[in-house]
Image (tube, rainbow, N blue to C red):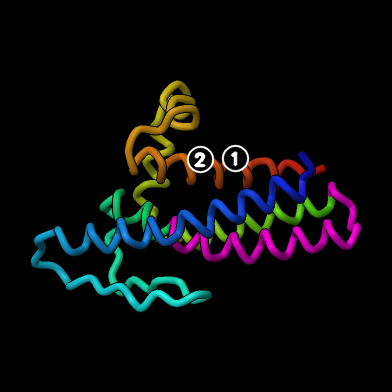
């Protein structure tokens, strides 16, 4: 299977996944009883991500779902762009490097307000981090897995800058 086909399949998966994530978050907001600020989810229109007016990043379920909704929207556009590059005959290695960096930027943006979770990474054992990467259990582990990916990318990127 060609790289273009794989990226296209991934893009289609994201397009199908996104409404399910939005519905899951919507259901979560409507079943939760809280005295905090009322959560509002904006209108769902093609091309416009759901806007969440209040995110509690201390809640891994909400934080992960919200970030994934934002990521899906951005990644679909990024994948379209990079699929076009490949279809135009651009160098595969350069396109894939650009794709990886674009994914990093989007993930870094989506996970900007999770400092407490980033600090938690410093206290996890290597064994626990490997378990999270291989078989995350629950939304907290999924959130940590994304932060591990971001940290690993930054480490690799910094090593490449030094050479």
Which residue is tagged 2? 148
Assess whether residue 57 is covered by the magenta stretch: no
Quadrant housing the N terminus: top right
Q: Residue at x 26, y 74 (%)?
A: 40
Q: Position of residue 83 (x, y in %)?
A: 75, 58
Q: Secondary structure at mark 2?
A: helix
Quadrant housing the C terminus: top right
Q: Are marks 1 and 2 in contact (CB under 8 Å)?
A: yes
Q: Residue at x 52, y 65 (%)?
A: 73
Q: Could you classify mark 1 by the number of other residues whose Cα lies within 10 Å: few (under 14), some (14-19), or many (20 or more)?
A: few
Q: Position of residue 64 (x, y in %)?
A: 37, 52
Q: In screen coordinates, is 67 left or right of 10?
A: left
Question: In this picture, which residue range is highlighted in magenta?
Answer: 68-93
Choose between 119 and 102: the one closer to the eye.
102
Choose between 53 and 47: the one closer to the eye.
47
Q: Position of residue 98 (x, y in %)?
A: 75, 56
Q: Residue at x 48, y 45 (%)?
A: 147
The correct choice, above or below, for 67 with respect to 133 in the image is below
The mark found on residue 152 in the picture is 1
Q: Secondary structure at mark 1?
A: helix
Number of numbered discs visible in the structure rendering: 2
Q: In screen coordinates, is 107 left or right of 65?
A: right
Q: How far is the residue under mark 1 from the one under mark 2?
A: 6 Å
Q: Residue at x 84, y 47 (%)?
A: 93
């Amino acid at each position: 299977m060609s790289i273009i086909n794989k990226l296209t399949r991934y893009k289609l998966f994201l397009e199908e996944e996104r409404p399910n994530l939005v519905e899951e978050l919507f259901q979560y907001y409507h079943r939760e009883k809280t005295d905090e600020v009322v959560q509002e989810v904006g209108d769902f229109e093609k091309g416009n991500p759901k806007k969440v007016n209040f995110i509690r990043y201390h809640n891994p379920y909400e934080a992960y779902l919200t970030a994934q909704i934002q990521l899906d929207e951005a990644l679909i556009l990024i994948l379209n762009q990079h699929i076009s590059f490949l279809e135009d005959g651009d160098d595969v290695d350069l396109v894939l490097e650009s794709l990886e960096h674009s994914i990093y930027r989007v993930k870094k943006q989506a996970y900007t307000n999770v400092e407490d979770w980033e600090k938690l990474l410093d206290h996890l054992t290597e064994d626990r981090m490997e378990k999270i990467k291989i078989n995350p259990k629950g939304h907290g582990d999924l959130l940590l897995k994304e932060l591990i990916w971001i940290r690993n990318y930054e480490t690799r990127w910094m090593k490449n800058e030094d050479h």
